[in-house]
Image: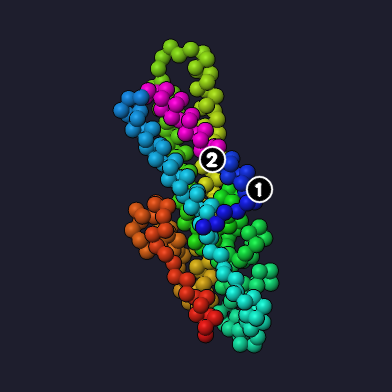
Amino acid sequence: MVFRTDMFGLFCVLITYTSICYTDYAVTVHMIGGSMSYSVWGVMNIMGFNFILLLMVLSHVRAMTCDPGIVSTLPNKQADYNLIKSEKYSQQENINGWTVCSKCEAVKPPGAHHCRICGRCIKKMDHHCPWINNCIGELNLKYLLMFLFYVVLASIYCATMIITYWLIHPPNLSSVVVDTKTMHTAILSAMVILFSIFAVAIGYDQFSAIRIQKEDQERMKGESNIMAMSIKEICYEVFGDIHPILWLIPLNLNRRRTGARQALLTS
């Protein structure tokens, strides 16, 4: 478990949870409560929407606090650093693509990069995301994608509730109530559009990066017939070889093997 104390990242996290809390209030009280009152359908929709928000928050917390794939530093830095820079490991480096970070002196595998904010090397690092106050790496990418999925799902649900309210809202409402509902509708609509575009764009960027990275790995292996990965193949690559239904649960149900580094150091 990790927790960053970067002030800008914490500010972005505060904005994220403030937006979630406001959305929950506006949709539950003004949209669902205003159109369905607290009937059976109203209660079911409130429970369904809040369940989506719960999974969204859990996914965000996991992405924020999960180890993104921090490369372990050497136990005896100076001695092992000198050993790895020797001829034996220099040759190994050329073969396997492993390098020694000049900043934290960690032995990092191919695709790992040093994050100046975290101060550590991260496996398969994409970038440091202030919205989760953590790096996006090998071990928490799936939680970020889960979070983006639930953002889109909540946005669709929210848009549906807005349309439903204005179609079946009670007649003879006072001008004050109508103005209040109109204000919340405008704010929610703007948030739905903004967050949906943001989530889809980030998700597309991540899927494209995974596809390109996998194709580059196949080229390095000398593969001649390289096929583009499908969405399903990318999901298996990120979430692991488990049932697709379990991809939606923000839990670590498929642990990755981490023996490559030990194999290198003991060879």
Q: Position of residue 83 (x, y in %)?
A: 63, 83
In the visual, does 183 lie left or right of 162? right
Q: Residue at x 62, y 77 (%)?
A: 76
Q: Residue at x 48, y 29 (%)?
A: 26
Q: Position of residue 34 (x, y in %)?
A: 42, 22
Q: Which mark is residue 17?
A: 2
Q: Position of residue 67 (x, y in %)?
A: 52, 60
Which span of residues is magenta-colored? 18-37
Q: Which residue is mark 1?
A: 7
| Above-or-below relation of 56 to 264 | above
Whether residue 124 is visible: no
Q: Residue at x 44, y 70 (%)?
A: 257
Of residues 34 and 73, which is closer to you in this image? 73
Whether residue 75 is visible: yes
Q: Residue at x 61, y 66 (%)?
A: 121
Q: Callout 1: few (<14), some (14-19), or many (20+) C-alpha neighbours within 10 Å?
A: few
| Above-or-below relation of 226 to 243 | below
Q: Callout 2: few (<14), some (14-19), or many (20+) C-alpha neighbours within 10 Å?
A: few
**Sequence-first disc among 2 and 1:** 1
Q: Amino acid at mark 1?
A: Met
Please check the rendered image and state whether residue 24 is part of the magenta-colored stretch, yes or no: yes
Q: Which mark is residue 204?
A: none
Identify the residue at the far front of this view. Answer: 76
Label 1 residue SS:
helix
